[in-house]
Image (cartoon, rainbow, N blue to C red):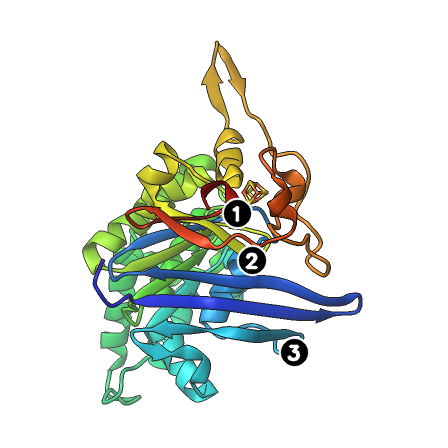
């Protein structure tokens, strides 16, 4: 990894005010990723993956969300100290995001070409004024973006409406929009969850291809360890607002350290003894208004000890760039 991380998050704590009380949704999350790195953020629904991503883009609804402490640095700059105008510049141009359901973000009454044009104009770099690019140049740029994400026959498809595209093609269009300003970091939040397995594989191949061609860094958020393993060099595992393990993909698969990571791996369907078997993790994610004391995983952990119910484990580096937060290693 580049000595200076592209993105680093330190001890991030986020709280949400609800009618029932304050939910402690992120409880001291820290990780860093380098330029050109692909990192997967995995965990069950509600563990804080998407909140982490939205915090990076400062897209949390404040209130009810509140960043209680911590910092987020991107390209050496503290994002939490930026004015909203500066953040608008960073969103899209330096950090872009794609989401699970492209139809929510595509306007059904405008063609794909019109929407791409709007995004291209919105992200003109300093020095490129509106009007300095002619209509032909903007159309060419939109076509290049569609070609870049392998939309077939872009010259005719540019005039189509979103409903005329399949789910996989709409996700490609959203990725094309995200890439329009050549961002440094792409955050992809469950980009393949709504797609069938074959299309999922195509979108993951596309992201991997873009990483290689554009030296893009990707933070891929998924509940599916199998999905992130396909394209990510590193995996960070989250549980109930804590980051419990962070390591290289082969480290995580070869020698998972945290009982929750081992549980996630066991819950992936495996073919053994001529049968498909999976061992789901018993129990459910805790209430974050009154989270369990000590290790938040202890009510579900088969290896818990007395200390686990009292003290929150600290993060320890067990092998090079492989960290775990668990009392089994302290
Ligand atoms: Fe299990 Fe204790 Fe480790 Fe938590 S700290 S995962 S309860 S062994």
Mark number for residue 43? 1
The CA span between labels 3 and 1 is: 25 Å
Image side of residue 13 versus residue 173, left or right: right
Q: Mark 1 falls on what kind of element? A: loop
Mark number for residue 48? 2
Residue 36 picture location, percent across and down: 24, 58
Give the residue displayed 43% in from the left and 88% down from the top.
Answer: 85
Residue on which the image places disc 3: 63
Residue 187 picture location, percent across and down: 40, 61
Q: Nearer the viewer, residue 181 or 279?
A: 279
Q: Determine if residue 241 is in view.
A: yes
CB of mark 3 near ligand 1 (< 8 Å): no
Q: Nearer the viewer, residue 60 or 74?
A: 74
Residue lying furthest top in this view?
A: 274
- Count residues near mark 2 (Cα–Cα under 10 Å), then give few for <14, some for 14-19, many for 20+: many
Q: Mark 3 falls on what kind of element? A: loop
Residue 161 picture location, percent across and down: 46, 61
Q: Determine if residue 110 is in view.
A: no
- Count residues near mark 3 (Cα–Cα under 10 Å), then give few for <14, some for 14-19, many for 20+: few
Vertical relation: 265 (above or below) 36:
above
Give the residue displayed 60% in from the left and 50% down from the top.
Answer: 295
Image side of residue 11 versus residue 73, left or right: right
Q: Nearer the viewer, residue 312 or 240?
A: 312
Give the mark nearer the N terminus: 2 vs 1.
1
The CA span between labels 2 and 1 is: 8 Å
User: Are the residues tagged 2 and 1 within 8 Å (C-beta)?
Assistant: yes
Q: Mark 2 falls on what kind of element? A: loop
Q: Quadrant of ligand 1?
A: top right
Give the mark nearer the N terminus: 3 vs 1.
1
């Amino acid at each position: 990894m580049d000595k200076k991380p592209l993105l680093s998050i330190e001890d991030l704590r986020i709280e949400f005010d609800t009618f029932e009380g304050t939910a402690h949704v992120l409880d001291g999350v820290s990780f860093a990723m380098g330029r050109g790195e692909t990192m997967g953020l995995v965990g069950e629904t509600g563990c804080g993956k998407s909140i982490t991503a939205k915090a990076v883009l400062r897209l949390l609804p404040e209130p009810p969300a509140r960043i209680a402490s911590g910092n987020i640095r991107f390209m050496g700059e503290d994002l939490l100290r930026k004015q909203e105008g500066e953040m608008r510049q960073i969103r899209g141009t330096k950090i872009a995001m794609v989401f699970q359901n492209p139809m929510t973000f595509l306007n059904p009454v405008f063609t794909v070409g019109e929407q791409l044009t709007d995004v291209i104009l919105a992200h003109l770099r300093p020095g490129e004024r509106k009007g300095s690019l002619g209509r032909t140049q903007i159309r060419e740029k939109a076509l290049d973006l569609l070609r870049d994400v392998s939309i077939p026959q872009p010259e005719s498809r540019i005039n189509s409406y979103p409903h005329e595209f399949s789910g996989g093609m709409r996700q490609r269009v959203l990725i094309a929009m995200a890439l329009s300003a050549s961002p440094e970091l792409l955050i992809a939040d469950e980009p393949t969850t709504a797609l069938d397995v074959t299309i999922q594989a195509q979108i993951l191949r596309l992201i991997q291809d873009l990483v290689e061609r554009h030296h893009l860094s990707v933070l891929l958020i998924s509940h599916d360890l199998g999905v992130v393993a396909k394209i990510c060099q590193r995996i960070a595992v989250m549980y109930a607002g804590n980051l419990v393990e962070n390591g290289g993909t082969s480290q995580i698969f070869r020698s998972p350290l945290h009982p929750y990571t081992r549980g996630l791996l066991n819950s992936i369907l495996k073919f053994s003894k001529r049968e498909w078997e999976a061992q789901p993790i018993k129990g459910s994610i805790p209430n974050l208004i009154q989270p369990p004391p000590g290790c938040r995983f202890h009510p579900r952990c088969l290896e818990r000890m007395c200390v686990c119910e009292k003290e929150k484990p600290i993060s320890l580096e067990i092998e090079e760039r492989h960290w775990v937060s668990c009392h089994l290693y302290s």
